[in-house]
Amino acid sequence: MPCTEKRVRKLLTNKQAFSFWKKGIFCIRLLRDSSNNQFQKVVCGIDPGSKREAYTVSTEKNVVLNILTDTPYWVKEAKKTQKIMRRGRRFRKTPCRKGRQNNLRNKEFLAPSTKTRWQAKLRIIDWLSKIIHITDVIIEDVKAKSWKNVKKWNSSFSPLEIGKEWFYQQVENRKYNLNAVGGYDTKRQRDKRAFTKNSKKLDNTWNTHNVDSHCLCEILLKRIINPFKRILRISFLQFHRRMLHKLQPAKGGIRKREGSTMSLGFKRGSLVLHLKHGLCFVGGFMKGRISLHNLKTGKRFCQNAKVEDCIFKTYSSWYFNTISTNVY
């Protein structure tokens, strides 16, 4: 359960607990039995969006954590490119299987781009549940635009609506108490608290998206909670899992190597400790050397790091940075 910094410092000083990091979050684990086995109510508020999404984890007294993430926006274009390349291979003089019946026809279909966005939310919830005992999840209910008296298109056929219902079912299967409220309820709570919302949706400030996730927690807990200034900024890494070479051949008709998720024994995105660059994550590899990237910005440090100079720490599929903001 969440506790104060004073108690954490006391437990570590008395050697009653040891500390560790869990993908950007500082945690402790007790070395003795807990004096109180009662769990308090912990709420996770989610503000979904097209480019940015916000999460706020809060108890009835204090905000525990604020998270601001990107969305995996690249899946739609990747599937489009996959379709073009596959169709091109059909016209080459290469062995290929015959076309077969589409077994997904007349069945409920969730588009890969939509499913990836909702899966990203589940990944964040599953990761947080390993650190904090989350009891309730509240999300701003998004609704697709629909038209009356139109047979071919309605909200029931929208990928957004299908993906939303799939996500709700997955959350309920994880035994969380799910709550969904409309955007007008969030605005009403935001106006009641006199919070201002930034119109620049790509800014990394608290009052851009986390203000809504904070208000969602207040709606569910039915009490006023002091806002928390600090944000954990998370950016998802894009992996090319099934791509083996460049899409376009180089001179001589040779296609250069591309894709894969392994770099000389390291899984890409893994956090490693380097002698010169410190804590960073692994990228691609070339000529027996690996590339290392900044954990805060994602920029590349070098392309010629030796494998023996890197100490593996943990696996990760995103990089993160802590942002402090005084804007409310």
Image (cartoon, rainbow, N blue to C red):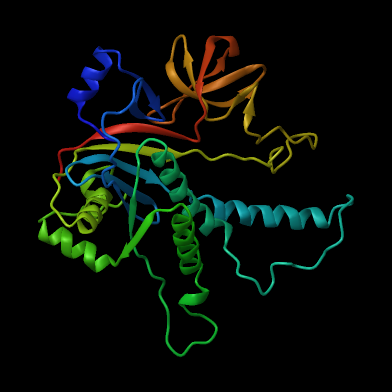
Identity of the residue furthest to the bottom in this view = 149
Q: Nearer the viewer, residue 245 or 7?
A: 7
Q: Position of residue 98 (x, y in %)?
A: 87, 61
* Front in this rendered view, residue 232 or 131: 131
Q: Nearer the viewer, residue 316 or 247?
A: 316
Q: In the image, is 215 to the left or to the right of 133? A: left
Q: Position of residue 37 (x, y in %)?
A: 30, 36
| Residue 101 drawn at (x, y percent) | 79, 68
Percent position (x, y) of residue 74? 52, 49
Splitting the image into 4 quarters, where does residue 97 fall? bottom right
Examine the rendered structure and indicate whether residue 14 appears above or below residue 37: above
Q: Is residue 289 above or below residue 113?
A: above
- Please name the residue shown 77% across and 55% down the image: 88
Residue drawn at x 37%, y 65% is 142
Asked whether, in this view, residue 109 is left or right of residue 278, the answer is right
Q: What residue appears at the point 18 percent right and 41 percent down from the top-left corner?
A: 62
Toward the viewer: 300 or 312?
312
Q: How many marks?
A: 0
User: Is 283 placed left or right of 327 in the picture?
Assistant: right
Vertical order, 58 against 323 (above or below): below
Quarter of the figure that contains the N terminus: top left
